Image (cartoon, helix red, strand yellow):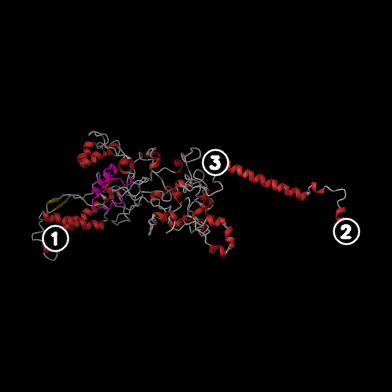
Amino acid sequence: MRSASRDVVDRFTGNRGYFHRPDRLRRWKNGAAFLAAGLVIGWVAVEFASPRPDVHSHGELAYPHAAFDSNCEACHKPHSSGEFLANPLSLFDTRSRWRDLTCIKCHAGPAHHASARDGGAFHNDCSNCHHDHEGRDSSLVHLTDRHCTHCHADLPAAHAEGATNFAATVTGFAKDHPEFRPLAKGQAESQRRLKFSHALHLTPGLVYDSADKHPWTAEEFGKQFGAAAKTRYAKDGSDNALIQLTCASCHQLDAGHAKPGDPDRTRFDQLAATIGGEPRQSLLPARAEGAYYLPIDFDIHCKACHPLRTPPGVSGGKVVEPFAVPHRKQPHALRGLLRGEYAARLAIEKHPAMAVPLGPGGRLDPAQSSQAAAFGKEVDRLTDAAVKALMLNLTPHDSPNTNGGFACGKCHYSTEAGKAEIARLPDRSVWFEHARFNHAAHRGVTCTECHPGTSGPVNEREPALIAGIKTCQTCHSPAAGVRHACTDCHRYHNGDRPLQGLGSPHRDPAAPLDLNQWLRGKP
C-alpha cells in the first residue's frame, strides 16, 4: 500500500532544493529583520554622536528647579497602585501622567482665561506653555510666539462669546500688532486730568517764550524758593546760570531697598522728611528692578516752585498774611482747615470783633455775644474768599476755559461745571496696563527718542508724549535683530497689573515648608 507521506514527497520531485529559494513571505520576513537591526544600530550611533545625550531622557531642569533634579514627585503628581487596579490601562497613558503637574503648590495665582471657548482647560494646564527638562539655561517664561498665537491669531474664534474688545488677529509684533491702546485717537487725551506743559517746564529759565524778559537764574531762584531748590535745579553751580529742569528733575526710577548709608537711602530719607505726615506711597521702593518711574508727588517735585498758599487778606484794617495750605485736600476739607487757621490768626491779632474773651476752652459760641457772632462771620468771609481764590478757574476738562488760576485751578480740573471739586487724577505710573516696559533696559536711548514733543508749543492740555509702535519696531524687529517675542512685553498671568507678580496677594504661603520638605516637594 502506498503511504500518505510518499504522496507528499512526490510533490517535490525535481525540486528537492526548494528551501534554498525563499518565497515572497520569507523574503519579507528577512527584509523586516534587517531593517529592524539597522534602525537599532543607527539609533545607538545617533545617541553617541548627539551633543545632547538627554534627547530621549527627561533632561536637566532649569536653574530655578535644579534642586528637584532627582525628585520627580516635587513637580509630578505620583500615581498610586489604586489607580492601576481601578484602570490597568492607565499604566500606558504616559503622556497624561507626566503632564499631571503640581505647579500651584509653589506658584499660586489667579484663575486663568475662563472666557476661552474651551472653558480655560488649555490654559489651566501649565505644561501647555511652560516646558522644563530642557537644560539649566533654558527659560521657563520666554516662550515662542506660537504659544500666544494659538488663540490670538483668531481671537474671536477662541473666545467663548465669539467676540472680543482686543485685536482680532495678531501673529507677531513686527507684523500685525495694533497701535498701543492708550495712544489710540482720543484715548489718552480724554483721560487727562492735569494742566501741564512739558515744553514750558523744560525751557531754560522757565520762560514762556523768547519775549519773556525775566528768566530765572540760579541766584534769583534761590532767593525766591530757597537754597535747597537752588542746589537741586542749578546744574553748573553758577549764580548767573539759567535754571534748567531735565527729565530726571521729576522722573526718578525706583532705586530699590538701599542699605543705610547708601546715597539712595540718604535721598529717600530726605524725601520722606520733606512730606512729613502725608502719604508716602510715592516714596516707597516697591519695585526693586527699576523698571518704572515713581509717581510724581506735589510735595517733592512741584512745591519748591509752586508753594500752595492763601492770598493775602485784610480784616479790621489789618493785613492777614498768606499761609501755607496742605495739598491733596478737596474744598470741603480745605474749608475747615482754613477757618481754623483764620480764627487763630484773628484771635492772636485781637480783632475788634473780639472785645470779649472766647467761651470755655476757646470755643466760638455765636449765642454768647454779638461780638463773637461778628467774629465768626469775619472768619467765614476770609475763608470763602480764600477758597474762591484757590479754586479760581477750576473748570471741567471739556471746558474751553483752561487758563491757569491762582493755585488749585492752575493745574487741576473740576469734576463738573459749577462744582468746586477737584477731579481725581488717574495713576499714570504705568501707561501700558496690558504690557510691561523696562526703562532701565532702555537707558542707552535719550528720553526724547520715545517721548517726543517736549520742545513743542506750550499747551496746558498736551497729548500723551509717548511714541507709537513704529518707533519700537525700529529696533524690535527681525531686520534690527532685537528680540520681539510676545513674552518680551506681555505677561499672561495678572497681565493687567504689571506692578504685581503672579497672584501677588497669594505669593506668601500660609504654611511654609522646612528645607527638607521643600526638596521633597511635600510636607
The residue to which callout 2 is attached is 3
The nearer-to-camera label among 2 and 1 is 2
- Relative to 322, 64 lies left or right: right
Q: Amino acid at mark 1?
A: Ala
Viewer-proximal residue among 284 and 478 = 284
Kindly state the secondary structure of the residue where label 1 is placed: helix
Choose the circle earlier in sequence order: 1 or 3: 3
Residue at label 3? 51
Give the distance between the C-alpha atoms of the residues marked 2 and 1, in whole angstroms.
Answer: 149 Å
User: Is 376 included in the stretch rendered in magenta?
Assistant: no
Amino acid type of the residue that numbered disc 3 sits on in the rendered structure:
Pro
Viewer-side residue, 342 vs 64: 64
Residues at marks 2 and 3, CA–CA distance in whole angstroms = 68 Å
For mark 2, give the secondary structure.
Answer: loop
Q: Which residue is mark 1?
A: 374
Looking at the rendered image, the quarter that the C terminus falls into is bottom left
Q: Can residue 5 be seen in the rendering of this structure?
A: yes
Q: Give SS at disc 3.
A: loop
Q: Nearer the viewer, mark 2 or mark 3?
A: 2
Give the residue type that dot 2 points to: Ser
Q: Residue at x 28, y 42 (%)?
A: 262
Q: Which residues are magenta?
A: 254-282
| Residue 517 drawn at (x, y percent) | 41, 56
Give the residue at x 57% y 60%: 90
Q: Eyeballing the image, is 76 above or below 450?
A: below
Disc 3 crowd rating (10 Å Cα; few below 14, some 14-19, many 20+) is few
